[in-house]
Image (cartoon, rainbow, N blue to C red):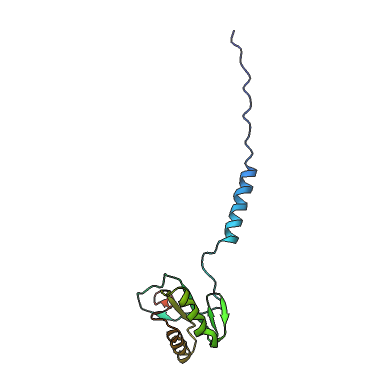
Amino acid sequence: MKLQRERPEPELINITPLIDVVFILLVFFMLAGSIEPKDAFPVDPTVSDSDMRGDIRDFVVLVDEDGQVAIDEQRIAREDLTDRIRSELTSKPDALIQLKPDSHADAVEVIAIMEDIREAGAEYIVLLTVGGGAV
């Protein structure tokens, strides 16, 4: 006579702790990571048909429509721009300076800022714009 064995019920694996850990890691990387650096104030760049790209990011000089200036995420006084860039260039002489003016900024003011950057010792300035097909 053949006896049937009782098959043990398969134990359910509790994956709740795994889901908790994955969720905590997701939240951590969302808060700690930064996909794109933030600007000190909102700037609406001008449109350009140029193919040149400014992928290298040493430091960016922002100019808003009112003529306020910021380097990376820090606002600075217009008078301190030349000294600040000069100090940046002494620490990193081959730094690529990117100028990102607002599309409504006064062109004369932007040119004056470019002259201040050149006066500080910069040999090359990249003007950041939005591509013609992006708008």
Residue 72 in the image: above or below residue 113: above
Q: Quadrant of residue 26?
A: bottom right
Position of 107 relative to 1 (above/below): below
Q: Is residue 66 visible?
A: no
Residue extending farthest to the front is 90
Q: Residue at x 54, y 71 (%)?
A: 38
Return the residue found at the far left.
51
Q: Position of residue 43 (x, y in %)?
A: 52, 79
Residue toward you, 15 or 62: 62
Which of 74 and 118 lies nearest the eye of the viewer? 118
Q: Quadrant of the N terminus?
A: top right
* Near-viewer residue (56 or 102): 56
- Say above or below: 10 vs 14: above
Q: Quadrant of residue 29?
A: bottom right
Q: Say which residue appears at 62% left-offset and 36% top-offset.
A: 13
Task: Name the residue rendered at 45%, 84% in the picture.
Answer: 120
Name above or below for residue 2 compared with residue 71: above
Is residue 117 among what the camera can see?
yes
**Which residue is the extreme one toward the bottom?**
108
